[in-house]
Image: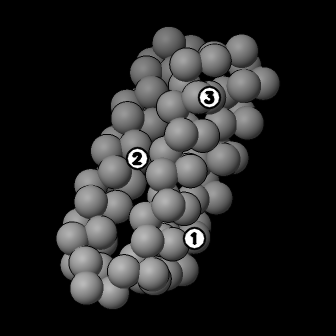
């Protein structure tokens, strides 16, 4: 699971840079914020073992929410083109 979280975190920052280069400031901030949140949940999960299950659930919800929003945005870009 750790590798998956690392990839999701990297994806957030890759998309943040992509949206920033396209001058889509809102999407860039949104992606960067979720990248930071993902890092926070990874660190907290390693530090607070008694709450690791809850942190995994919250982190997964955040990650899937971000991925769904990005997928919807990219699909809209394809239909616009």
Q: Is the residue 26 above or below the residue 66 in the image?
A: above
- On residue 28, the disc is 3
Marks 1 and 3 sit apart, C-alpha to C-alpha, by: 19 Å
In x, y percent, where is residue 21? 78, 24
Residue lying furthest right: 21
Residue lying furthest bottom: 49
Reading the image, the residue beneath label 1 is: 6
Residue drawn at 37 percent across, 35 percent down: 69
Which dot, 2 or 3, sits closer to the camera?
3
Residue drawn at 21 percent across, 71 percent down: 54
Residue drawn at 55 percent across, 25 percent down: 27
* Element type at mark 3: helix
* Element type at mark 2: helix
Reading the image, the residue beneath label 2 is: 67
| Residues at discs 2 and 3 in contact (Cβ within 8 Å) | no
Q: Which one is in front, 32 or 68?
A: 32
Q: Is the residue 62 above or below the residue 44 in the image?
A: above
Q: Quadrant of residue 61?
A: bottom left
Location of the C terminus (image quadrant): top right
């Amino acid at each position: 699971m750790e590798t998956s979280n690392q990839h999701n975190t990297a994806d957030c920052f890759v998309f943040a840079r992509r949206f920033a280069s396209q001058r889509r400031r809102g999407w860039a901030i949104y992606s960067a914020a979720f990248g930071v949140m993902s890092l926070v949940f990874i660190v907290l999960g390693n530090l607070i073992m008694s709450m690791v299950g809850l942190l995994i659930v919250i982190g997964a919800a955040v990650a899937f929410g971000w991925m769904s929003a990005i997928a919807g945005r990219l699909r809209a870009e394809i239909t616009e083109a």
